[in-house]
Amino acid sequence: MKPVEALVQDLESKTVTSVQLVEECFKIIEEKNSEINAFLRTYKDDALQQAQASDTRRAEGKALSSIDGLPVALKDNISYKAHVVSAASNTLKDYVAPYDATVVAKLKGLGAIIIGQTNLDEFAMGSSTENSAFGATKNPHDTSRVAGGSSGGSAAAVAAGMVPLALGSDTGGSIRQPAAFCGVVGFKPTYGAVSRYGLLAMASSLDQIGTFAGTVEGARLGYEAIKGFDRADSTSEEKPAALPAKEKYKIGIPKQFKVDGLDQFIDDYLEETITLLEAKGHEIVEVDIPLLDQSIAIYYLIMPAEVSANLARYDGIRFGHKTGGDVVRSRTEGFGVEVKRRIMLGTFALSAGYADAYYKRAQAARAELTNQVMEAFNEVDMLLGPTTPELAFKLGAKTNDPLTMYLSDIYTIFVNLAGLPGISVPVGQADVEGKGLPIGMQFVGKPWGEEQLFDVAKQIEVKHEE
Amino acid sequence: MSAIEKEQVQKIAELSRLSLSEDETTLYTEQLGKILEYASHLPELPETLVATGKSLRLEEDRAMTSDNPHAFLRNAVTDKGYVKVPAILDKGDS
């Protein structure tokens, strides 16, 4: 499938219709989704009807926006009015969203066509989409491997050519890591840039909605469509001071990124990326962010604490798996193992006698880590490193060892802890067992440095044919 | 001593409104222990309560039109248009 920016032009010049694009999406979905399991639900008839209406608007010169008629997918934790939104959890398998998330309302208002909802780790908790109550999503590049997570369905859908643009959510890397594993661009905006109203909350001080596309420009166009202030999200930023793109950038590589177990292919591509950036006149320097080493420890105390509070609402009364008012049974039957693990971890970290040793200490460390990152930004414009320390792993390889699974988020988590924007860009593939496994590099910007990230990411992205 | 004991896991499950089998209790004790042990090496730093560096904005208290309440009640256990909750004073039927 052509990238978003080409489709937008084709729609504008009427060389393609929205109906044709939706049909193209469903041709591939029908061919591949039973194996990949990227989509949990699709709406072909409804999408074709909307596409028809979009084509009529275009014919009359009344297009709502440049993306009018563009097919889009939603991660299944984003409220889509009058449709099931399950968070890939048994507890919400029959839940019908009573309202649209702000991002969905925006997409609808711009004329985009929502074709379906994509798979995820239950309540976005996981790094492989294996924690879905509705089966794992498989990596389109090698179906014996994971797509990454938690937004694995959105990443795989774009990678497989099922849809040109998809939304995801990113709490500790849930957009960037699956994007790297699936060979697409994944973008997580600054905290407060995109409204989370209607996003099923996981960890509210970390959650952010972002975009997946085949190209950096595609991810940017998606971001333009969904960003902006919203009264309904109290963390939404009213007047962000966006940093403009520059001619040359000073780019820092944290020395803490040199970890044991960094895949050799990925390390080689990092060197290649550095060479490429230097050839374009950018300066690459090493920076020191000592607390980066502790980012996973900080995250796995703060995130579960917020999870335990946010998921208290699933009691089987207002919503959630219904067991005739038996709250404990409703939760026990409704939640999967990873969700239970995090709820309990968070409950413990917040409990009397332990909150000082765990939660409060993690909060203090988070604040200090953020200070250290901001100090590094006094020296450099942005940070660069691999998105993941390893290539997409085999299905089932880590499901019995949660800590090992958590450690794979080493490069992405600090970005959420400090509320920064980050983008994962595919830079190449590693040849493993006869399959090409994608490799992603991550750029991390200053708060509101989105345009700088898009600018640099475009300079290194691999141009590939449609 | 491990970071968490079986009895604590049972207590936490109760606080979390979850019920665990014996096997699950054993498994979670081991897994949570590993994670807490990993997380226990954080440095001690001056306490702060700022999570995101953002201050929350308060909204003006004003009435707004809402969507159809039936759409909201559709997901709840209801009886005659009311949300049914478990009885808390009596073990009998509400």
Image (spheres, helix red, strand yellow):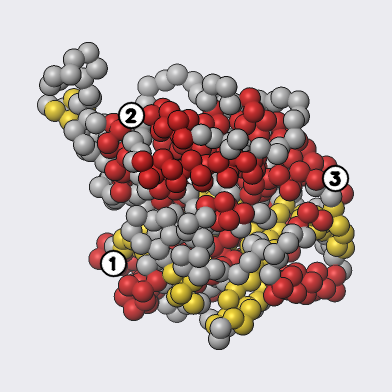
Visible residue check, residue A224: no
Of the numbered discs in the image, which one, if any, rests on residue A44? 1
Residue closest to the eye, A307 or A63: A307
What is the chain letter for disc 2? B
Residue type highlighted by circle 3: Asn
Q: What residue is shown with label 2?
A: B65
The crowd level at tag 1 (other Cα within 10 Å; few <14, some 14-19, many 20+) is: some
Q: At which x and y percent is residue A240?
A: 66, 40
Q: At which x and y percent is residue A316?
A: 27, 35
Q: Dot 2: what SS?
A: loop
Question: Which of the 4 image quarters holds residue A220?
Answer: bottom right
Q: What residue is shown with label 3?
A: A378
Question: Which of the 4 image quarters holds residue B77?
Answer: top left
Residue closest to the eye, A451 or A439: A439
What is the chain letter for disc 1? A
Q: At which x and y percent is residue A17?
A: 39, 74
| On-image quarter of the C terminus of chain B | top left
Q: Compared with residue A358, is residue B93 higher up or lower down, i.e. above or below? A: above
Rendered residue at 74%/30% (across/down): B44
Residue type highlighted by circle 2: Thr
Of the numbered discs in the image, which one, if any, rests on residue A449? none
Mark pair 1, 3: CA separation: 50 Å
Rendered residue at 67%/55% (across/down): A411
